[in-house]
């Protein structure tokens, strides 16, 4: 039996929908798309266009649950989890800022988990890996800081780098590039070594909130113990977890969190980052990660950085900044529920990137980079730190 | 809820589905953007709903033909009004579609779901869109496909509406899907007058009569210079604060000189009818000063759902209906302590009629307020009908209330046509009390 405890907290929001349908598709003068109305919901657009896949329909479902007209069936649970929580629907919502639909989905998922009805299998497997091995991949904990071999990083310091699971296990070049850039700019960097755990992003979104809180609590304690006053991360999902979720639960943590793009942008302005080289590609585009952009409002720093690299022209995709199209991978929800759908969404994004004439796409989220690379091999995908390190001529 | 949802892509697919539904006697409810105010009726009871087909036309969204010489554009019914308008605007062209929320409302939804075909961005001067719909392609309840207008000559293109007998395009305007499924619509093209000017004028709260006098004088100008003309004023809450009335006009033209001339007409008429308290070329500023903004912009963000009684009034009856409605709302809602709000009332010039709206906002999580708002909404509709107003935006509830007042002979006439076209009564059978004995 689901008690709807969390959903009840969002009752006002669940009923705030004006049913305008802007969460399906929207027009904006800000977005000079070829077709004036542009898709808002990647799931609605790529999954048959049925109402229950867009926020307007899912809010009706939420109301049905609250009123006891609907129960959490397997099919309904599938619908609620097949959503990247990309938040474009929140941005265009007629009832914004009252209505922020992904918060409702997250509350419903928490109720589902509390009742023992979720999360679905693949997400449960991720949860198990995070619980047992503290990373989303199930990699051995002792290998988590292998990326730092030979760097002689201290475990105490004022500025601490939080690598995240992707940079630690599958894309170590991001971690090594980030540290190299910041050191070159004269910043002493510490790290948590083997004491860094997953940030909990999947669990914050899939409803396994007690596990999310456990890993978050651990990370906060370890960071405090390190003496860090600033935590920098190159992962948009880790950044969102710290900036939004940790802050919502614990309020003041005692340290500031910045995304590496914010820090690098400042260092470029101060002349502390100098580009001695460039990238092989002269025309690039930037993919805004949902959790860096729409969740945290960071849009300009990555663009400032890219535009500072000599010989590089930044070409914006049709849907960019607040209107950026999701890569499909957010918090591993859609890839876990329907990997083909996630790939299709990412392929759509890559096609949009290609339309700009760009030879490479830069992003500042390892999960986005991963999802985009899986979808399309015809265009190079850079992580921002990797691109910057390369343009600085650093050997990482 | 419907038991079956279909999303056809072609007229032929629609036809095949309708034939199948006819054979099996399964009701079909066509659907566009899903923005009907009061919902639709998939069944008379929850048990029946699994036997109803929802026909979602949003995959039929192609712009099929633009003929700039004949001044026509033909589109599939599922295209959104915004997409159509914006595509045309980029070519310097314009069609009358709908004021909002145009991003999700479809052309098919407007032509079928709004009597007269709704009102576009320039509805004050243009009135109902009906005259600007040239013809349709429709799938009849037996699955046959017909075209109206000049396409009644199979050799002709769709270039005109009136020919070869009765105006059958009109049968498919505001029909709520009871006579078939509209799959293509041809609309009249206009050049887009890209220059615009606005003006705002405030009248003291006590001077509704003066404000309305100026409004009527402006509306009566034979050249209809105002693409939008509205009188915005208090709702039940702001009546307590004695909020002023604001007259708003917008003009469009093909040059700045034309806009200036039209604006000058407004100034002269207002100066000669009833002197306002304040003028301002910035309409939004004048509303903000009086804590009024258009309810579409403000109230949903604070309150969520609305009930929207919107009578279309004869101009000589508008003032009486507005006063009586505000009095009714004030009396009904005085003791509700803000649980039901209104951002104001509005009177819009809609061709030769006035389109009046009284939005009521409530939190849907407050069931008592919801019930009360709906009760007041019904009372306003009854009052307006009683005083000779009509309703354009049709849905299950308003449609039934209006149909209850049909003269019996008219209702029989409507049923006879329906029965003749749709003997199995499969097309949207539960509206306009057509299925009632």
Image: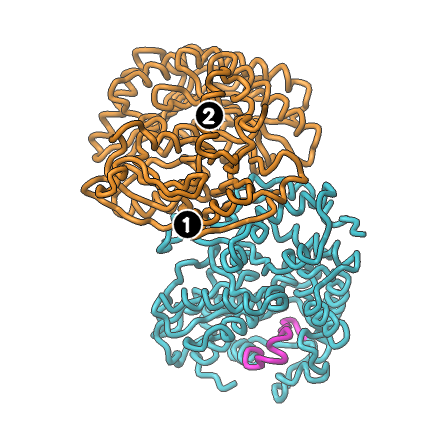
Chain colours: A cyan, B orange
Work out whether residue B335 or residue B29 is closer to the camera in this orientation and state it: B29
Relative height, residue A362 to residue B290 (above, below): below
Image spot of residue B174 (x, y percent): 43, 31
Element under label 1?
Answer: loop
Residue A337 visible to the viewer: yes
- Residue on which disc 1 sits: B60
Quick check: is B182 in the magenta stretch? no
Which residues make up the magenta segment? Answer: A157-175
Mark closest to the chain's N terminus, 2 or 1? 1
Image spot of residue B71 (x, y percent): 23, 39
Q: Is residue B310 left or right of residue A29?
A: right
Work out whether residue B371 or residue B163 is closer to the camera in this orientation and state it: B163
Relative height, residue A267 to residue B90 (above, below): below
Mark 2 to mark 1 CA distance (whole Å)? 31 Å
- Residue B200: quarter of image: top left
| Residue A32, disc | none
Quick check: is A164 in the magenta stretch? yes
- Residue on which disc 2 sits: B416
Report in which chain the residue with disc 1 lies: B
Element under label 2?
Answer: helix
Say which residue appears at 52% left-offset and 36% top-offset: B424
- Residue B313: quarter of image: top left
């Amino acid at each position: 039996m689901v008690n709807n405890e969390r959903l009840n907290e969002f009752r006002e929001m669940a009923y705030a929908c004006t049913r305008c349908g802007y969460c399906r598709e929207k027009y904006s003068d800000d977005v000079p798309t070829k077709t004036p109305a542009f898709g808002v919901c990647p799931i609605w657009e790529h999954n048959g266009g049925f109402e229950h896949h867009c926020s307007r329909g899912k809010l009706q479902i939420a109301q049905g649950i609250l009123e006891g007209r609907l129960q959490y069936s397997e099919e309904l649970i599938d619908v609620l989890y097949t959503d990247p929580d990309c938040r474009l629907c929140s941005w265009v919502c007629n009832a914004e800022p009252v209505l922020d639909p992904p918060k409702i989905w997250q509350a419903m998922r928490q109720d589902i988990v509390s009742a023992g009805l979720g999360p679905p299998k693949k997400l449960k497997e991720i949860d198990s890996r995070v619980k047992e091995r503290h990373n989303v991949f199930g990699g051995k904990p002792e290998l988590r800081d292998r990326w730092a071999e030979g760097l002689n990083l201290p475990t105490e310091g004022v500025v601490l780098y939080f690598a995240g699971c992707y940079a630690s296990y599958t894309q170590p070049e991001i971690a090594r590039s980030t540290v190299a850039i910041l050191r070159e700019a004269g910043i002493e960097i510490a790290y948590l070594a083997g004491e860094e755990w997953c940030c909990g992003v999947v669990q914050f979104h899939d409803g396994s909130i007690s596990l999310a809180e456990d890993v978050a609590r651990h990370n906060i304690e370890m960071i405090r113990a390190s003496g860090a006053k600033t935590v920098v991360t190159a992962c948009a999902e880790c950044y969102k977890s710290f900036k939004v979720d940790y802050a919502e639960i614990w309020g003041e943590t005692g340290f500031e969190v910045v995304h590496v793009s914010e820090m690098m942008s400042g260092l470029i302005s101060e002349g502390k980052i100098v580009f001695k080289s460039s990238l092989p590609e002269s025309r690039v585009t930037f993919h805004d990660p949902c959790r860096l952009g729409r969740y945290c409002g960071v849009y300009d720093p990555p663009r400032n950085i890219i535009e500072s690299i000599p010989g590089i022209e930044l070409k914006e995709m049709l849907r960019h900044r607040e209107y950026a199209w999701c890569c499909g991978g957010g918090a591993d929800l859609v890839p876990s529920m329907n990997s083909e759908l996630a790939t299709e969404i990412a392929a759509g994004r890559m096609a949009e990137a290609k339309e700009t004439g760009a030879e490479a796409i830069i992003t500042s989220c390892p999960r986005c980079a991963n999802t985009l690379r899986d979808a399309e091999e015809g265009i190079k995908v850079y992580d921002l730190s990797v691109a910057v390190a390369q343009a600085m001529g650093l050997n990482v | 809820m419907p038991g079956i949802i279909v999303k056809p892509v072609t007229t032929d697919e629609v036809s095949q589905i309708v034939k199948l539904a006819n054979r099996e006697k399964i009701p079909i409810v066509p659907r566009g953007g899903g923005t009907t105010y009061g919902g639709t009726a998939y069944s008379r009871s929850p048990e029946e709903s699994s036997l109803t087909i929802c026909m979602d036309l949003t995959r039929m969204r192609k712009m099929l033909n633009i003929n700039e010489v004949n001044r026509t554009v033909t589109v599939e019914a599922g295209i959104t009004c915004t997409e159509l308008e914006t595509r045309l605007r980029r070519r310097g062209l314009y069609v009358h579609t709908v004021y909002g929320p145009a991003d999700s409302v479809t052309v098919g939804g407007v032509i079928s779901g709004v009597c007269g075909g709704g009102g576009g961005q320039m509805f004050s001067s243009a009135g109902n869109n009906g005259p600007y719909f040239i013809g349709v392609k429709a799938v009849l309840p037996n699955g046959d496909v017909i075209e109206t207008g000049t396409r009644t000559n199979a050799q002709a293109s769709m270039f005109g509406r009136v020919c070869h007998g009765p105006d059958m395009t009109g049968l498919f305007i505001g029909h709520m899907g009871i006579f078939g499924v509209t799959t293509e619509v041809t609309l009249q093209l206009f050049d887009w007058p890209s220059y615009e000017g606005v003006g705002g004028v405030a009248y003291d709260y006590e001077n509704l009569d003066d404000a309305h006098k100026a409004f009527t004088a402006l509306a009566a100008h034979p050249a209809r210079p105002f693409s939008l003309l509205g009188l915005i004023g208090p709702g039940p809450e702001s009546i307590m604060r004695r909020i002023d009335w604001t007259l708003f006009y917008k003009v469009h033209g093909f040059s700045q000189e034309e806009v200036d001339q039209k604006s000058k007409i407004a100034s002269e008429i207002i100066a000669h009818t009833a002197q306002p308290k304040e003028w301002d070329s910035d309409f939004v500023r004048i509303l903000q000063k009086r804590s009024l903004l258009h309810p579409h912009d403000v109230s949903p963000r604070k309150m969520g759902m609305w009930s929207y009684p919107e009578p279309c009034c004869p101009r000589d009856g508008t003032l009486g209906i507005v006063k009586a409605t505000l009095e009714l709302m004030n009396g009904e809602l005085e003791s509700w302590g803000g649980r039901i709000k209104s951002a104001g009332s509005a009177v819009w010039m809609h061709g030769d009629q006035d389109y009046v709206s009284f939005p009521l906002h409530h939190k849907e999580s407050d069931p008592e307020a919801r019930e009360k708002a709906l009760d007041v909404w019904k009372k306003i509709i009854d009052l307006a009908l009683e005083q000779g107003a009509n309703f354009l935006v049709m849905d299950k509830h308003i449609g039934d209330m209006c149909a209850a007042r049909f003269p019996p002979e008219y209702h029989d006439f409507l049923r006879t046509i329906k029965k003749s076209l749709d003997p199995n009564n499969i097309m949207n059978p539960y509206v306009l009390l057509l299925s009632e004995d």
